[in-house]
Image (cartoon, rainbow, N blue to C red):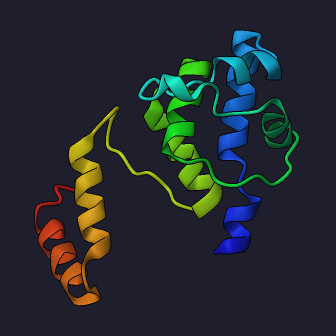
Amino acid sequence: MADEAAARTDFADLVRRRMAELRLGLRAVAERAVDPDRPEEGSLWTKGTLENLANGRAIKAPGPGQLRALAVALEVPLRSLQDAAAAQWFGMETVTAGEGDLETRLLVRRYQAMSPEDRRRLQIIAETYDPS
């Protein structure tokens, strides 16, 4: 799993794409990357870290404040960055049935926490209601 996660570039790809769409350079993104919950801390991303990320070099997984700051800098929903970070650093996939479907995410998390026996029981119940 670690090798799989290390090979992922979801977060870096999203950052590069948004920088290109907004026509922002590394320095501009770094200057704009301020956590709206803690603006007194100033920028939470350095030009060098963003450059490493953009060039495919390893960086530490960003923390919550860094994700909020980058969401502001790149004008993207925080959830998009969280999902991309989870995929890149932890190999996690976000499952949704529709845009912002929190109920589906909650059900998936609960399903993943179930024992194999409970999962099988739930599958049997779901198959009972499958119209196909």
Q: State which quarter of the image contains the C terminus.
A: bottom left
Q: Is residue 38 left or right of residue 55?
A: left
The front one of 48 and 53 is 48
Going 76% across and 33% down the picture, which residue do you hit? 46
Going 68% across and 73% down the picture, which residue do you hit? 2
Q: Is residue 131 left or right of residue 58?
A: left
The front one of 108 and 64 is 64
Q: State which quarter of the image contains the N terminus.
A: bottom right
Residue 75 found in image quarter: top right
Q: Is residue 81 left or right of residue 50?
A: left
Residue 118 at x, y = what percent? 19, 83
Going 88% across and 40% down the picture, which residue do you hit? 55
Residue 49 at x, y = what percent? 79, 40
The front one of 56 and 37 is 37
Residue 108 at x, y = what percent? 29, 60
Residue 105 at x, y = what percent? 30, 51
Number of numbered tags placed on the structure image: 0
Residue 84 found in image quarter: top right
Going 54% across and 54% down the picture, which residue do you hit? 86
Q: Does residue 32 sit above or below 8 in this rendering? A: above
Q: Name the residue furthest bottom.
A: 117
Q: Name the residue furthest front.
A: 40
